Amino acid sequence: MPVRVVDTATPSSQPSPGQETNSVHPSPPSCSLLSAGRCFAGTQNVSSLQKDEAWKVNVRIHGCDLEQGYLCGTMEALNVPLADTPVVTFWEGEIVDAKNYTFFTGKWEASPEDDIRHWSKFPSFTPLLQSQVETDGGKSLDLSNYPHIFMRWKEQYFVNVGVDCGLTIAGFYYVCFSCSDGSISGFYYDPSSSPFQKLELKCTNEKNSGFTFSSYELQ
């Protein structure tokens, strides 16, 4: 959720060219660290040419359905200069499993070239057949035993502030999740924001233990 430049946020509920519904590929591996109730904490680098800046970020997963390639949660950004309070957003995610979704986004102003450029930022993407991904989004890859899970997270709305808070949720995150330790890395994409803003999170709890968010009502 970088500083707003232009507000072009759009809903993401409709199927897209990046979504595959008739493939026979198995789902990503069941991962206990990627499940409802898990919490993560870290930072998002929002530096620009003018200054270096990073926000503290907390993430909670509220729902996860590996079979459907879907998850959702909330993201809380702390120490945001333009806000008087932590800014909380609700996001929905697509799990790249070559069954429900491929590496091609097909929406949110992201071209296949944008996709490859961002996925290639993750070292764990390197072992995959990039030529296959460039051809069909990785539709024929078997990711069921891969030690990392690739996702896209799209913020849908602000939970506790108005749209005039000075931030934008027009873009989305390319995300890589480690099944071994629950660490998350990501890059925010929005043509109107600074490129490659990096998200780095670590799992902070065993489900309901660890830190907790303030109470917010999700609509």
Image: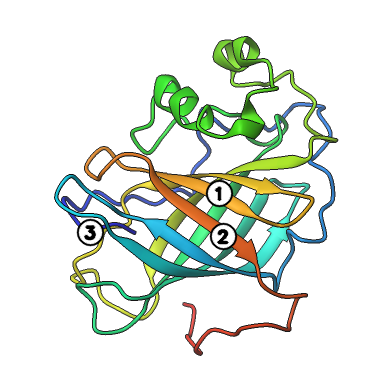
> In what element is the residue under mark 2?
strand
- Are the residues flagged by discs 1 and 2 in contact, CB closer than 8 Å? yes
| Mark 1 → mark 2, Cα distance in angstroms | 6 Å
Q: Amino acid at mark 1?
A: Ser
Q: Which residue is mark 1?
A: 185
State which quadrant residue 163 falls in: bottom left
What residue is shown at x 46% (from left), y 68% (from top)? 57
Q: Amino acid at mark 3?
A: Val
Local crowd at mark 2 within 10 Å, few (<14), some, or many (≥20)? many
> In what element is the residue under mark 1?
strand
Q: Which residue is mark 3?
A: 3
Local crowd at mark 1 within 10 Å, few (<14), some, or many (≥20)? many
Query: Which one is closest to the eye, mark 1 or mark 3?
Result: 1
- Whether 40 is drawn above or below 190: the answer is below
**Label placed on residue 117:** none
What residue is shown at x 21% (from left), y 42% (from top)? 192
Looking at the image, what colour scheme do you see? rainbow
> Residue 87: horizontal and vertical position, in percent?
35, 75
- Whether 125 is drawn above or below 75: the answer is above
What residue is shown at x 72% (from left), y 47% (from top)? 68
- Are the residues flagged by discs 3 and 2 in contact, CB closer than 8 Å? no
> Residue 134: horizontal and vertical position, in percent?
55, 14
Local crowd at mark 3 within 10 Å, few (<14), some, or many (≥20)? some
**Label placed on residue 201:** 2
What residue is shown at x 16% (from left), y 52% (from top)? 5
- Whether 108 is drawn above or below 164: the answer is above
